[in-house]
Image (cartoon, rainbow, N blue to C red):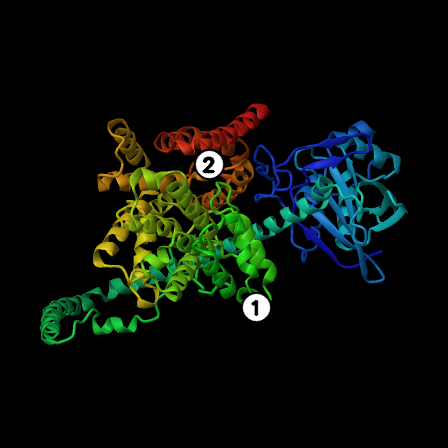
Amino acid sequence: MGGGASRAAASGSPAVVSSQKAVTVPVASRAAAPKVPDYPPASSGGDEGGGAYADQEAPAAAESHAVSPPLTVAEESHKLLGKEKYVKEYGALAMDDRVKSSSVGTLFFFCAAQTDSTVFSYLENCTGAVFAHAFTDAELAEAKHAAKVGFSWAPFFKSIAIAMIKSSATVTTVTHTRKDVSFTIFNSKDPSRTFPFVVTMEVVSEGGAPDPKAVYDFAMYPLTRAIEYNRARAVSGERERCAARVECASDVLAAAVQEHTKHSESLLPLVQPLREESALQSQQTMLEGREVRKLERRLKARDEHIITKHPVDQLYDAGGAQPFQHSVWSPEHIPQEEEPDEVLSACIRAAFPLGPNMKLSEISLVLERPDIRRQIEASGNQKVIFDAFEIFKGIDCWDYDTIQLEIITDGNALFYTTYLLLYKLDLVRYFNIDDEVLRRFLVAVQSSYHPNPYHNAMHGADVTQINYYIMMLGGLEAKCRLSKEEILAGILAGAVHDFDHPGLNNNFHSRTGAYLATLYNDRSILENHHIACTFELVRHPLYNIFATLSDAQRLMVRETMIEMVLATDMGNHAKIFKNFQVRMSETSDWFSKKDDVRLALSMSIKMADISNCARPSHIYAEWAKNIAREFYLQGDAERMLSLSISPFMDRTKEAEEFPKGQISFMMYIVQPMVEAISALLPSMNFAVGLCAENKEYWKRMTEEAE
């Protein structure tokens, strides 16, 4: 048996089955609906999960595999040299098992994440059955000793790794409940000797009655981690190449500058008179420019028509989200405006706002209407549309599945969530917003979000929906008697609150002297950029969703959006939170004063922005992993710049710092916020318990580690 092989990166399986007894380690997964979140353990490979690429060869053995007398089992199991290099660094190895060019199954070889057992598993294609065998270090040493393998651990593991990569391992069916996999152990330092090594794998999941956990533990989990790792490795590799190019260019430019400086100093006596003449000419140009502007104003005043643009501004007719290079440490992002599925958009318009006596759980009935049905069938996208509508049924829920919506709609969760809410709340009809302009605007907003691990368009969708929940279902609308303009501002503020976020925080911009830090004087740097870019976008008629609003309405929406987005700067947290506490002690009237309404809306979007810690554990776990990845990328950039690494952003201290950071953030920021919101809106009290559950999880993990 043999064929094409591929390598998948994974840090291991959350559960293993040994030859003596089953050892199960719980893990947070969607299928298991865990009570506590699962955050991936720290990896020795420098990125989550460790791993390698399929098109790379196995690394040559750097160490000498000298032949020595056989060790005892106890001596061999003390430390398995080579396990780190040939198994853990590669995360997981996968071999496509083929018979006469037909794939019959997949063989996996990896280390369990938490038990460190060495695992062999096999997924049979025709039946779906899963076979597995896991060795503790002592058991593996005993098996190696029993097979009379005379080489040390390094060539042992290297032989298995090469067999997996080259698909030279042989899988044999013994019975329907047992399979054997055979390897040939060799040593390049002693080519005259080889040893057979056979692993027997027992069935852990029958094809006819599959065990979902076993399938997940021994097949899906390592493959999932492989995808995550390869993506992270690709991004990391590109960033390192970019850094190398910048460093090389910097050295070349520095040498050139030094040479040109010497040359310029020699020319200075000749240039000085010319500079003085140039200064006089510049002053004259300024005076003439003023005269030109005076003439322009006079011409505009004489014209019968109102001129809203300078003639030069007519060139700015493309519109849309514009690229902006924040820093060399932030990968360049070119917004690509691609219209999502028009048929799914049409289905949303047909379903919302809900008709009389129509329940949210019944919106899929709209898809059965003959006219809608014909459009769906013609689109060839029937499954995506029906699956999306199942998720839309949870739009009024605290556990709305933004992550799954992002997956099935190919990255369009922000567009569809915001589009749905604007129609559900009947704001499109109320303000007479042009649907084509609205869709174009939302596409531009979504395209402005960078593919960051955390501050991405999916986060924008998540904040938009939670902010909507707090306003419309949590009771803020009734408490503050929100106007239609304030509700519109609230929905849009959530959607644009991280517009063009580069994945590097305000502190990084200030410490590196980035342009935006200078532009905004180190005050709410990114938040000012987010909202400024948004209103620059709507200046163009093609994207101006406020075109049908009156001047007073536009001003109210703009002022509310600005205040809400700027409130998401954690640098303003203490001030806003203190103001809120003072107002809570002074009054129960939250609707008479505009400032009180704006303060309540600011608290709403702040809560939405950090709400992951007060969400069900499986949602919190996903976002915790995402923020950790983004933090560590910034920490890597700070390390390369020889800056002190920001707290909780040093990947080398992940195991000790990340749990403590999460506990501190929940204890001092999130929990007080949730409790304060619950005091204003009692129906939000359930979030206090969710936050406490997630915090207690990390406390237990910290205590166990100690």
Does the image show residue 643? no
**Above or below — where is 512 with respect to 36?**
below
Q: Residue at x 56, y 39 (%)?
A: 618
Quadrant of the rendered structure where residue 511 is?
top left
Residue 200 image offset from top left, x and y in percent: 85, 41
Quarter of the C terminus within the rendering: top right
Instruction: Say how many tags the image has.
Output: 2
Going by the image, does 427 lie left or right of 632? left
**Above or below — where is 313 with respect to 262?**
below
Lower position in the chain sequence, tag 1 or tag 2: 1
Does the image show residue 174? yes
Which kind of residue does numbered mark 1 sit on? Arg
Which kind of residue does numbered mark 2 sit on? Phe
**To which residue does mark 1 refer?**
374
Going by the image, does 100 lie left or right of 377? right
Residue 123 image offset from top left, x and y in percent: 77, 48
- Using the image as rendered, state which of residue 630 and residue 397 is in the foreground: 397
- Disc number for residue 605: none
Quarter of the N terminus within the rendering: bottom right
Where disc 2 sits, the SS reads: loop
- Using the image as rendered, state which of residue 416 and residue 284 is in the foreground: 416
- Using the image as rendered, state which of residue 365 and residue 601 is in the foreground: 365
Residue 598 image offset from top left, x and y in percent: 27, 42
Q: How crowded is mark 2: few (under 14 residues within 10 Å), some or many (20 or more)?
A: many
Name, please, the residue furthest toward the front: 357
Where disc 1 sits, the SS reads: helix
- Using the image as rendered, state which of residue 111 and residue 638 is in the foreground: 111
- Disc number for residue 648: 2
Q: Which residue is drawn at 37% across and 33% down?
A: 681
Labels 1 & 2 near each other (Cβ < 8 A): no
Q: Residue at x 44, y 39 (%)?
A: 611
Quadrant of the rendered structure where residue 426 is?
bottom left
